[in-house]
Image (cartoon, rainbow, N blue to C red):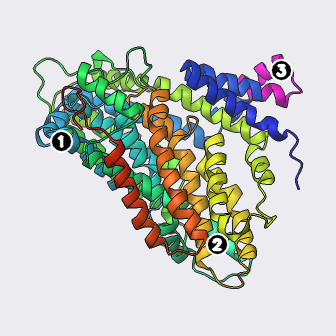
């Protein structure tokens, strides 16, 4: 076993950040505390050196100096700028009025939001930013809480992108599957195996079933129900005293009498989507690659930055052609929109720095080392469940699904083959274990407070980050619980996944029907 110097101490930085954030609801201070604590441990428990390293090494040297990280941050600022110009033209109000005229109630508005999220399947970052920013004024008009909006945005991001055959996730997933099989001399087409694992991704599938069940039946429960009651009764889409991840700038409102057009949203957003989709192919293409491989091989942070700046330019040109503003006003609107993302940018930069601390302390490796994958004592039946739980915990603690997949997959595939005495073929049991890794990792991406996609969902939806995490957690845990009871445990017994999917979907629907409560437009519980 490799030297895991810090051992259980590696748990302290994320625990400090998560617990303090839930307790005090101060995300920035909480992340700083986690980084400082980890840096202090790494530097022989010297708090002064830890403090200096927090800023010079982890925030500047690793978080902001990393090309991927800074690319995502610049992308976020550029999208904010684009949204600022769209708002200044009156496009945001126009699209809100247009969709609101068709989405007559809360259910149709939420359904439109969820379907838009599923449609933008090719990248979870682009998904969150586009859907959240586009639908926020519309859901506000229907008095839907920002917590509910951020839940819908988050639930239609990573769970969808991770299962899409054309997405920024595909190369990572195919590469890990292929490497694991090659190490065992097992023949198999990694793309075919990718498709075969989809029915075993119980958490991702049940999360989507839960999302659409809640919307269709107009039900909620737990802290989300309280948020919806508050929003309907008072019109406060954010809780009083909360810290929304986006600031509303009145300077970005159009001039009095300005009539906006939905084309002022459709054209820039359409350009953004097209450039992202084809830019992923262009950026990732190498000789001999097909379209799927090229998209998966792309650097999404670069492509998203291209798309954000070009669509910003398009919005600026559009505004000047329509004489909604001049070039000076366009620049001011872009800067104002970018400034509205400042809180999200700071939190994202600190989350990246905390991940660097966690990585240096080898938390994920330590967690995997203490799990008895190779002991055989837990038996074949429990292995898919153990793999799923491990992936969930590692991803939640580290805030990275890709890192979780990269660490667990090379371990899980050989163990699954050995435990099931498999030679030369990919069995349903191996597929179940692979699916458990991939979907367990999505749990962390979906609801960890230090996950970048969770942060982006809060930001784009204009929600308080901790309120988003707190209200989403019961839904995520319900989907995970059902995934274990009717998914991974029966998979260990050899039950076909389609049976588990039917049983799980029915369980979700029944629980929502029995436990959930409907809130009317006045904030009263009617069922």
Mark 2 burial class by Cα count in 10 Å: few <14, some 14-19, many 20+? many
Mark 1 burial class by Cα count in 10 Å: few <14, some 14-19, many 20+? some
Q: Is 230 colored magenta in this rendering? A: no
Task: Locate residue 14: give its quadrant.
Answer: top right
Separation of disc 3 and disc 2 at Cα? 43 Å
513 or 232, nearer to the observer:
513
Separation of disc 3 and disc 1 at Cα? 54 Å
Please indicate whether residue 90 sits to the left or right of residue 273 in the image. Answer: left
On the image, numbered disc 2 is attached to which residue?
178
| Magenta span dominant secondary structure | helix
Separation of disc 2 and disc 1 at Cα? 44 Å
Q: Provide the secondary structure element on which disc 3 rests.
A: helix
Q: Residue at x 26, y 47 (%)?
A: 217
The residue segment tinted magenta is: 39-57
Q: Is residue 405 above or below residue 198?
A: above
On the image, numbered disc 1 is attached to which residue?
263
Q: Is residue 279 above or below residue 229?
A: below
Residue 159 is situated, as x and y percent measured from the top left of the image, at 46, 53
The residue mark sitting in front, 2 or 1, is: 2
Residue 437 is situated, as x and y percent measured from the top left of the image, at 61, 59
**Which sits earlier in the primary sequence, circle 2 or circle 1?**
2
**Which sits earlier in the primary sequence, circle 3 or circle 1?**
3
Q: Quadrant of the C terminus?
A: top left
Q: Provide the secondary structure element on which disc 1 rests.
A: helix
**Which sits earlier in the primary sequence, circle 3 or circle 2?**
3
> Is residue 13 at all visible to an observer of this figure?
yes
Q: Which mark is on residue 49?
A: 3
């Amino acid at each position: 076993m490799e030297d895991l110097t810090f051992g259980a101490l590696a748990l302290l930085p994320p625990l400090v950040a998560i617990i303090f954030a839930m307790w005090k609801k101060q995300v920035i201070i909480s992340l700083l505390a986690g980084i400082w604590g980890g840096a202090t441990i790494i530097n022989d428990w010297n708090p002064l050196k830890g403090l200096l390293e927090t800023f010079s090494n982890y925030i500047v040297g690793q978080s902001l100096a990393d090309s991927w990280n800074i690319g995502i941050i610049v992308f976020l600022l550029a999208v904010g700028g684009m949204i600022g110009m769209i708002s200044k033209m009156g496009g945001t109000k126009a699209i809100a009025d247009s969709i609101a005229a068709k989405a007559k109630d809360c259910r149709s508005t939420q359904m439109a939001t969820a379907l838009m999220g599923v449609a933008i399947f090719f990248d979870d970052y682009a998904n969150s930013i586009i859907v959240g920013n586009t639908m926020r004024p519309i859901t506000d008009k229907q008095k839907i809480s920002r917590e509910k909006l951020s839940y819908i945005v988050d639930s239609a991001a990573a769970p969808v992108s991770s299962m899409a055959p054309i997405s920024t996730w595909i190369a990572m997933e195919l590469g890990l599957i292929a490497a694991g099989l090659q190490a065992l001399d097992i023949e198999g087409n990694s793309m075919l195996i990718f498709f075969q694992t989809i029915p075993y991704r119980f958490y991702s599938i049940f999360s989507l079933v839960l999302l659409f069940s809640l919307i269709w039946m107009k039900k909620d429960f737990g802290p989300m129900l309280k948020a919806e009651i508050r929003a309907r009764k008072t019109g406060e889409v954010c809780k009083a005293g909360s810290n929304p991840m986006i600031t509303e700038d009145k300077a970005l409102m159009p001039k009095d009498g300005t009539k906006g057009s939905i084309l002022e949203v459709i054209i820039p957003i359409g350009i953004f989507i097209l450039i992202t989709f084809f830019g992923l192919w262009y950026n990732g293409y190498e000789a001999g690659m097909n379209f799927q491989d090229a998209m998966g091989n792309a650097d999404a942070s670069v492509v998203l930055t291209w798309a954000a700046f070009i669509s910003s330019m398009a919005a600026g040109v559009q505004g000047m052609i329509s004489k909604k503003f001049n070039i000076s006003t366009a620049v001011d609107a872009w800067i104002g929109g970018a400034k509205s993302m400042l809180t999200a940018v700071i939190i994202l930069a600190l989350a990246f720095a905390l991940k660097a601390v966690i990585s240096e302390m080898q938390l994920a490796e330590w967690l995997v080392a203490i799990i008895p994958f190779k002991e055989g004592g837990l038996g074949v039946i429990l292995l898919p469940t153990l793999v799923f739980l491990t992936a969930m915990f590692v991803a939640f603690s580290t805030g990275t699904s890709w890192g979780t997949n990269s660490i667990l997959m090379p371990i899980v595939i050989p163990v699954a083959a050995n435990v099931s005495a498999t030679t030369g073929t990919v069995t349903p049991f191996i597929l179940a274990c692979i699916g458990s890794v991939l979907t367990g990792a999505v749990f962390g991406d979906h609801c960890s407070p230090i996950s970048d996609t969770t942060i982006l969902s809060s930001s784009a939806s204009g929600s308080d980050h901790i309120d988003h995490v707190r209200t989403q957690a019961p839904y995520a845990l319900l989907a995970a619980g059902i995934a274990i009871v009717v998914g991974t445990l029966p998979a260990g017994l050899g039950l076909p996944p389609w049976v588990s999917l039917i049983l799980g979907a029915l369980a979700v629907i029944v629980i929502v029907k029995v436990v959930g409560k409907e809130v009317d437009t006045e904030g009263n519980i009617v069922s």
